[in-house]
Structure formats: C-alpha cells, structure tokens
Amino acid sequence: MNKPVGYIIGVSCVVLLGVVSYMYPLRWDLTSDKRYSLSDATKTLLADLPGQVDVEVLLDGDLNSGFRRLRRSTLELVDEMSRYGQVRSAEPKANSTDGLQPTVIHEREQNGKTVQTTVFPYARVTYGGRQTVVPLLKNNRALNGEQNLNKSIEGLEYAFAEAIHSISRDTIERIAFLEGHGELSEADVYDVSRQLSRYFDVDRGALTNDVRALDRYKVVIVAAPQEPLSEKDKYILDQYVMHGGRVLWAIDGVRLSEEMLSSEGLTPIIPLDVKLTDMLFRYGVRVNSVLVQDLQCLTVPVDVSGEAGQPQYQPMPWTYAPLLLTSVSSPVTKDVMQVSSVFASTIDTVGGSADIHKEVLLATSTASRVTHAPAEIDLSNLQVDPQLFGSAYLPVAVRLEGVFPSAFSHRMIPEGLTDNSRLDKSVRTRQLVVASGSVLQNHWQQGQPLPAGYDRYTGVQFGNRDFAVNAVLDLADDNGLIALREKNITLRLLNDRRAHELRGAIQAISVATPLLLIGLLALCVGLIRRKRYIWS
C-alpha cells in the first residue's frame, strides 16, 4: 500500500469515527457519586413519553460562579434526558419570566463594592400545551450559599422528573381530605391543598355507607379529627388500607382550648380519644396523650411591662411550639428545614411485625420533655428550667410501609355495611402518622392565607409545606421517583484563603503548563522526524 492511499484511509477512518461518535455519543460517568447519571426510574419515565417536552432554562445573565454551575448542571441534565426520551432544550420566550419571583444576589467584590444582581432561578417545562415551573434554587437558611447551591444541583433530577411526570399524565390522580369528625377546615389547610393541587385533584368529603367509596383516591388525609370516628367509618378506612390505599394520619393526642388560653392565660389539657387507638395500634404505632415541650422552639411576644406601664413586648420561648428535626435519611424529609408545630404529642412504635417497616421522619431535639394529660398550661409561669428538659429525639412522625393486619380481623362488619371483598391482611402499602395536626395547618392574616409553617412573628418559613407535599407524593408514588431525592453530590469547596495566598503561583502554573506541554510535543515530533530522515 502506497503512502497516499494510506493517508486517505486514515483520514477517512477519523472522519467516520467522528460522524459515528456525533450520531451515537458514548459517555462514561466515572464520578464516585454518579452525578452525571440518570436513575432507572427517570429513564423509564422518559422512554414512555408519547410527546415532545420543551425545557426553557430561565437562569441567565451576569451570573457568579455558583449560579453558573447551577445553570450548567441544569443544561447538562436536560441534555442527558434528551438521550432517553423526547426532551429538548428551548430558548426562553420574551414573557417566560412573567409571574415569577426573582432572586436578588448581593455580592461583595474585592474592592469592597457591593454588586446586586437579579436572576430567575427557574425552568419552564412545556408538554402538549401544558406548562409547569421548576424552581432550580433551594434556600435553606441553615445552610450557606455554596451548600444551598449544591443541594439545588442534587435535587435537579427529581424536580424535572416529577414535573415531567405531572404534566405528561393522561389522567390526574385524586386525593381526599376526610371530613365529618371536626377535622381541620378547608381554610386551615388551604396552603397545603393549593400546593397539592399541582399534582392531584383534591377533594373533601364525609364518609357514607359505601365501603368502596375511597377506592378512587390515591391518598386519604385525616387531618386532626376532634370527634370520635364511628365503627362504620373506621371499617371503611381500614378496608381502604387493606386494598392498598394510602393514608396520612395527622392525629392530636390531647385536647385544649386556645381561646381560653388566650383570654384567661391558662387551659386544662385532657386526653383526646377519637377512637383510632386500636386501629393505629394494629398498624404498628400509638399516639400518646402527652404534650411535647422543647427548648428548640418558636418564640412569642410577651408583655413584660406589668399592668401599669406601657406595653413592652419581648420575644419569649414558647416551648409548647417545638421545632421538629427532620430525618436526613428519608427522601420525604431530606433537605427539608425544621418543621414547626404547636401542642404536639409523641408516637410510640409498637408490635414486632417483620412485615412492617417503620421510619421516624420528625422528632424533637436533644432538650425536650413531655407533660402527661390531664394537666394544665399556665401563661403566668413561662420560666424555663433547662434541667427538666432531659429527653431527646422523641418521635412525632413515623412512616409505615408493608403488609398491615386489619383492625377488624375476627370481628363483625359494623351494622349497616355490606362488604363482599373484605380482607384481613393488606396488600403492600404505605401510611404516615403525625402526632400533630398543626404541621398541616396554615394561618390567615388580613384575609390572606399564610404559607404552612410560616412564623408571623419572626417572618421565618419552616419546612411544613415541603414536608406535607413530599409526604403525600411519597404515599402516592408508584414509580420510585421520590427516591431521587436521596441523591447526594459531594461538595468540594476551595480554601479561599489558601487560594488567595497561592494565586500568583496558580496563575503561573496554569499559563506555563500548556506551553511546556506544547514545547515538549514539538521537541518529540522534531526528534522523530530527524531520526526518520537521517535513517532514510
């Protein structure tokens, strides 16, 4: 073979290899945390897409290095998704940011000047005429900026997968809030209901004599009933669980009067029995008739001036409003801020069934205590003795998954009901029990609903809304998408002081290294050519 022919074949092979690699790109994710790989659940979701999904990344402009990394990670994720389904990146339209709340970044330059930048950390996902907005930035006040950006990058795959799943479904699943037993009203759970309406059709209603009435709902929420449930209602709920239904139970353990506490400064605490103890016990938990106090709590303004002087309000710790710790090992509560509560109780896990997996999602801090009902709360004595707060990590919310025994096993069907498909053992399903209805509750101010978990006195937003939404999404999840929230990306931060000290050396090495490599390559080529022509 002569040299020209060899050159032509070589060039042709290189060109062919380039075309093949462009048409069928190959990637190997060699990172230890697999940050560039999609999960099997996401790949399955994308492969089943019947139509085109357009993603507009709105995070643009004069960004700092952290937000540039977030934008780059978002675009890389969209590009990776396009390999497994009909997903493509689209240029943002002129009105894409309408209605979105911008984020203002304040940065201090080396000369001391403060620079303010406004960005829109969102992506708009469009499918078949339907749209949804994906927030790209998480803002946990307990973390610094770099950590929040890292958590945001960790959550990108779940955020996009959940958004695509929501808008591409042919049918929208339904959930229901139970009524008829003094549960939280529609106004009390307005914020949580509004957030859930992004994913589900949300209904409310009381039970009838139809045993299968709940079967059309993916999740049923029992939000702080104050009146006992009848045996008929308990049976309907029990058989709903036996047939694979999922229930979020928010059950108060004690009864008290907030009106009496506000007007008279004290209120008695008595056990609250809504006749669910036997049922929940069979499922593996017990809500205790106690009231939690915690040194890690909300504060309330208290008049310390006395009766004669002008009112002088000072923030005082309100230990009956504990800030609950969230589990870092569960996808429901991972990266969720502390959850605020008021007049919460505790939960015991009971029974030793290997068929039921129990996981604590919310717990008190390391400085907590319980008050057993009956007792009373007296506002005239708000002094706190830390020595009395010797309990730690008392469970307040527990997730249950497995095969549950029926609370009506070996019992007659309640009078007035007919059931030809009764089960004494459930199919595999999930439940979640929270020992405080306040976790789901929102307040109102000047006729406007406040977000669930928003503290009116400090202006701090706690994690109640995220916890409630994640809990229902977890209960309703059949595709394993919620597990994507467990993704971890190791944060490798630079030592700013060390980097500044070695700035000159780093710059010199960065400039000199490529030049040295080019020079070394040129020297090697020259020696090879010289050797070849001398011998020839």
Image (cartoon, rainbow, N blue to C red):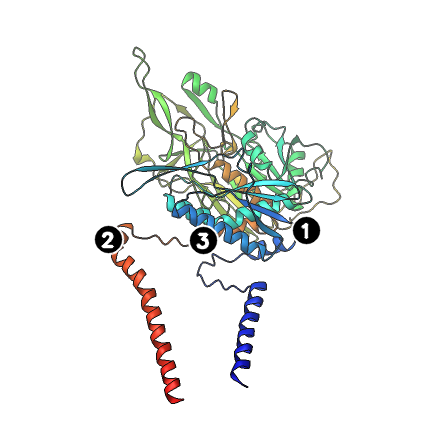
Residues under labels 2 and 1: Cα distance? 55 Å
Residue under label 2: 501
Q: Are marks 2 and 3 in contact (CB under 8 Å)?
A: no
Q: Earlier in the sequence, mark 2 or mark 1?
A: 1
Identify residue type, mark 3: Asn
Residue drawn 33% across the image and 35% down it: 388
Residue 50: which disc?
1
Identify residue type, mark 1: Pro
Mark nearer the viewer, 1 or 3: 1
Placement of the N terminus among the 4 image quadrants: bottom right
In-front residue for pair 163/270: 163
In-front residue for pair 166/288: 166
Q: Looking at this rendering, what residue extends furthest in the left direction?
A: 501
Residue drawn 67% across the image and 50% down it: 51
Identify residue type, mark 2: Glu
Q: Residues within 10 Å of mark 2 (few under 14, many from 20)?
A: few
Percent of width and height locating residue 155 = 49, 48
Q: Looking at this rendering, what residue extends furthest in the bottom direction?
A: 535
Q: Earlier in the sequence, mark 2 or mark 3?
A: 3
Residue under label 3: 488
Percent of width and height locating residue 26 = 54, 65
- Above or below, comparing residue 482 to residue 338 in the picture: below
Q: Earlier in the sequence, mark 1 or mark 3?
A: 1
**Tag count in the figure?**
3
